[in-house]
Each structure stands twice: as structure tokens, then as C-alpha cells.
Image (tube, rainbow, N blue to C red):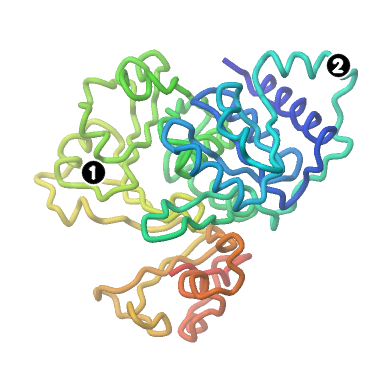
Amino acid sequence: NLTYEQLNLQASIFAAHLAQNTTVGPEMIVPLCFEKSLWTTVAMLGVMKTGAAFVLLDPSSQPAHRMQGICKQVNAKFVVCSKSCVPNFEQLPGTSTFILDDQILDEVQSSQHLISGHGLLPPTHKNSLYVVFTSGSTGQPKGIVIEHGGYAITALARQSTLGLHRGSRVLQFASYAFDVSIENTLDTLIAGGCVCVPSELQRKTDFARIADEFQVTYADLTPSVARLLSPSDIPTVKTMVLGGEAMANEDVKRWASEVRLVNAYGPAECAVTATVQHVRAVGTCSNADASKIGRTFPTAGTWVVDQSDHQRLLPIGLTGELVIEGPLVGRGYLNCGNESSRSTTFLQDQPSWRSQFSSFLGPMISRMYC
């Protein structure tokens, strides 16, 4: 268990340690590799305090060659990890490891007479916060760069919509390989809630018990995982967010009358959750009710365009390609420059139809993802 004061202190100690022993700062990307534990959160905040960005690796689901490939793509000079994860990177040329655990932190703290921000370069809203990689199922995995400003604005807008507050006890269930694990950590801390982190074994074998032990009130799961549970298994959960897969009618029937059920959607290119639909139990729900992904937040906008031509905005009611606009849209793909893979998804120029509508979205409205 860590209080906010303890978390902040440990992250500051580790940030100072990194700054004293490495060349670290804005736009550097630092891989973090841990089993499920509190040290992932300490490492995330520590790296953020140095001004650098992080990329989360998951030793439980990603093979060593995959993690090493990500380290190469981000040009990592070092990896912050647990002792047990060190062997994954011993054969990686030009990359060292920094172990983070309670023993190391105690040693670092005892050797420092003063913890200060000397040597740390705080990031600006335009600096990168994290990089998350696509699955690579259709080719080479691509790293998506999300910036501080876009994430912060979106996280603040999400809080009331998703029901996050100081009393929230949020289960950190998702794999570190997926960006929802970042949202469940950072959004919860921004709201002042409690991040509940089960061990990897607990996460896979004893969900109901850990939900009761941690008194979890908020769970963010895929529908397929939620189907392994019933509301009576997790009576403390008041908000159930389902995302990552399409919600089905059976999910609505199982959960909507028992919890605050939310259908969440968002590509990794758009700071995790982009649209939200609150699903309420009203009579017999149809498949159409379950499939609605709802609306985006006040700081963003959504449009539907022709699938073959994003310059053509479609009338309401027609099927087309979804375009997401606003500060939640990421910077683009890492190391892709102006390649076609970027220009066909991250729109470099606003479509001509956009000028017909008022610019209500504030800063960074020009960013659009198709």
C-alpha cells in the first residue's frame, strides 16, 4: 500500500536517481518492464518527472524478442525493470537495465542527502507522455505517440463521464501491453482514487476474490472476460466499463440492471477511450442497443465520412468511416515521418467540409484521426 505522499516521494527519488545516472529528458522514451505490482506506477511517475516518456512492456504476455524489438524501435538507452525481468534484456546491445524495487529505492534514498529537482527538465504539453504499440497483426507493429496536453485534457473530460472520483477503487486488470492499463492508472490518480493492482497470478485465477479483497468499485474489462463473471461474484463493483471488443446483447442483460454499465470505444491513436455510451436496462434490449458506442467528450468531436474519401462528409444515418478530432488524437506513429501509413490515418490537413462548422474544440482541434 502507498499513500499519495509516499508514491510522490518514491517517484521523485527514482527520478533524481535516473537524472544523476543517465542522460534523460523530454522526448526520450524509456521502456518499463514489470510484473503486475505497485512499482510500475512508481516507474511511470518517476519517468514523467524526468520529462521523458514511457512505453510499457508486459513480460507475462510478450516474448523477449517482442520486447527487445520495441526497445530497438524507441532507441532505448536503458530499461527500467524488476530483477526478474533483467534476463530479457541482457543480450540487447547498447541497452542497460535499471532495477526498481524497495531494496534499490532504500539504497538510493540513503545515499542522497537531499531530493531535489536539479537536473530534471519538466515536460511541456507538447512533449510525449507515452508510446503504445499496435498488435502488429497486419504487419510491423507501430508505436503511437501520445502527448501530455492531449492526454490531460481528455482525462479531465473523462472523469465525470466515466464516474471516476476520490472514492473510486479501480482494478488494474488490463495487460501492460494495452493502453487501457495506462488510463486505469493515470486517470485514477488524477481523480484522487485508489489503483488496485493484483498479482499476475491473482489476475488470472481469482478475480472475484481480489475484487472483494480490494473492495473494487470500478472495473474496466473486455466483454469476453466479463462473461466469466456474474454480478453476484463482484458485489462491490458499481461501475463496469466494457471495451476492447464489441458489446453483445447478453452483456447488457447480465450487467445493465446491476451496475453502471458503460460501453467504451477508442483506438490507441486517440488517448485510449474516445467515445462512451451509458447502457441502461429498459425492457428487452436489442443488439442495436448493445452496439452503440455513444458520443465523445466535450473536448473532442466525431464525424462520419465516405470510406474511400475523407473529404466527403456523409449525411446522418449513413454508414461510413469514423473520424475523431481534438486534443485526444495522438501526435502520430513513431519514426514514420510523412509515410503513407501516417497520412491515411492521421489527417495532416483538415478536410474542406470542416470549415462549415464552428471550431468549438479549443486547442489542437486540427488533429484528426480516420
Type of amino acid at the residue the image marks with label 1: Arg
Q: What residue would you read off at disc 2?
A: 111
Query: Left or right of 321: which side holds 352?
Result: right
The picture places residue 48, in percent across and down from the top left corner, at: 69, 40
Name the residue nearer the viewer: 208 or 203: 203
Q: First in sequence: mark 2 or mark 1?
A: 2
The picture places residue 264, in percent across and down from the top left corner, at: 35, 48
The picture places residue 321, in percent across and down from the top left corner, at: 34, 72
- Location of residue 176 with respect to 203 vertically, above or below: below
Which mark lies nearer to you, 2 or 1? 2
User: Where, by quadrant of the figure, is residue 76 drawn?
Assistant: top right
Q: Tell me the CA gap for discs 2 and 1.
A: 56 Å
**Image quarter hosting the N terminus:** top right
- How many marks on residues? 2
Type of amino acid at the residue the image marks with label 2: Ser
For label 1, the crowd category at 10 Å Cα-Cα, with few meaning under 14, some 14 to 19 and many 20 or more, is some
- Location of residue 199 with respect to 349 vertically, above or below: above
**Local SS, label 1:** loop
Which numbered disc covers residue 280?
Answer: 1
Query: Left or right of 359: which side holds 207?
Result: left
Q: Residue at x 67, y 42 (%)?
A: 93
For label 2, the crowd category at 10 Å Cα-Cα, with few meaning under 14, some 14 to 19 and many 20 or more, is few
The picture places residue 24, in percent across and down from the top left corner, at: 78, 43
**Local SS, label 2:** loop
- Location of residue 79 with respect to 103 vertically, above or below: below
Is there a contact, CB below 8 Å, between mark 2 and mark 1? no
Q: Residue at x 58, y 66 (%)?
A: 336
Name the residue nearer the viewer: 82 or 9: 82
**Image quarter hosting the C terminus:** bottom left
Q: Residue at x 29, y 48 (%)?
A: 245
Which numbered disc covers residue 320?
Answer: none
Query: Left or right of 186: which side holds 124?
Result: right
